[in-house]
Each structure stands twice: as C-alpha cells, then as structure tokens.
Amino acid sequence: MKKSILVLASAALFLAACNSSTEQKSSEPAAPAETTTPAAAPAPAPTEPAIVTLNAGDDMKYDITEIKVKAGQTVKLTLHHTGKLPITGMGHNFVLLASGVDENEFAQAALKAKDTDYIPADHADDIIAHTKLIGGGESTEIEFTAPEKGTYDYLCSFPGHHAMMHGKFIVE
Ligand SMILES: [Cu+2]
C-alpha cells in the first residue's frame, strides 16, 4: 500500500514536472521581434503648408465638405465662386468656427450682420478664420494656422446658405 502510494506520488510529481515544463515551453514568448519603428515621438508641426481649394457656385454648394490638415499647419485656403450670380443674391464665404460653437446659432447671428458681410462682430471669438464674401466669378484667399487636433465646422454665413454650404474641418 505504502509503495503504491509512493509510486503514485512520484508519478504525480513526474507528471507535474512534465506539465510545468511543457507549459513553460508553450508560454515562453517567441523571440522578441525586431523593433524597426522607433518609439513614437510627438510629430513636429509640419512645415509644408496645406493648400486647400474650395469651389462654390450658383448651386449653393461647396465642392468639398471635408478638409483635413495637421495641427499647427499653415493653411492656405482659396475660395472660388464658380457661379455668375452677384454677391447680393448669391454671396459666398468660408467661416471656420471654433470648437463647440453651435453652427445654427452662429448662422442666426450672422443673418443680422449684413453691414459686415454676415460676419457678426460680436461673435469674433467663435471664428478661427474666415474669408471675405465674394460674388460670381470672384476668388479670395486666406492664410491661417490650423488649430489643435479636433473636428471643426465651416460654413457659408450668407443668409440661408449654411444648411447647404457647410463641412467638416478635421485637424489631425
Ligand atoms: Cu454661400
């Protein structure tokens, strides 16, 4: 009886040893892969400017509704009015709103700012950058620095246009 217990015990020990050795083998991590990519360092602000060309015609639409740039990047944005209608009937601009600004509320305020081409002076803090208002056949260019990472709204603040003329300005 004693002998058989001993045999069992040693068998158990042997099994345990076997198990642990195979377990160790299977759980042993594979040879560490060569790390070819260096640890990610914060990217410096890009030195190349982002060139953005936005077209809008008499159909009251921007041709681009998503613009992507990098944080801190210089943005050179050109707005072309490809239509024929005059500024009084079909004026277009580009207004980039600050983070968290409600597009509808801003557009409402812009309605009352006819004297300043629908850029409401009392909402200056809501605006990161904007072009002047232009009519058919005209172009205008602005340059500004992209804000911090995030998604921002842009719109045309001419009365009645923003529902059709708006887009996302994505800073990566
Ligand atoms: Cu417009």
Image (tube, helix red, strand yellow):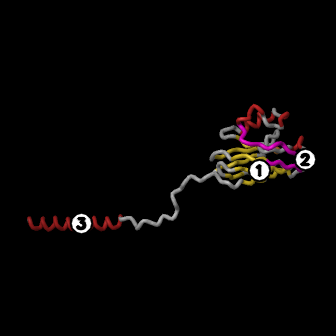
Which x, y percent locates residue 101? Answer: 68, 38
Residue corresponding to mark 3: 17
Q: Are marks 3 and 2 in contact (CB under 8 Å)?
A: no
Report how many numbered discs are placed on residues in the image.
3
Q: Looking at the image, is mark 3 or mark 2 earlier in the sequence?
A: 3
Q: Is mark 1 within 8 Å of ligand 1?
A: no
Q: Residue at x 52, y 60 (%)?
A: 38
Few, some or many C-alpha atoms within 10 Å of disc 3 (few <14, some 14-19, many ≥20)?
few
Q: Secondary structure at mark 2?
A: loop
Q: Amino acid at mark 1?
A: Leu
Q: Is residue 18 above or below residue 124?
A: below
Q: Which residue is mark 2?
A: 85
On residue 77, the disc is 1
**Pointer 2 or 1: first along the chain:** 1
**Amino acid type of disc 3?**
Ala
How far is mark 2 from mark 1, CA to CA? 22 Å
Where's the N terminus, which quadrant? bottom left
Residue occupying image coordinates x 54% and y 54%: 41
Taking the spot 79% from the left edge, 40% from the top edge, the residue there is: 157
On whether ligand 1 comes within 8 Å of the CB at mark 3, the answer is: no
User: How many angstroms separate mark 3 from mark 1 (CA)?
Assistant: 71 Å
Start-end of magenta stretch: 126-141
Q: Is residue 138 left or right of residue 100?
A: right
Image marks 3 and 1: residues in contact by CB distance under 8 Å: no
Q: In this picture, is 126 found above or below 65?
A: above
Neighbour class for label 1 at 10 Å: few (<14), some, many (≥20)?
many
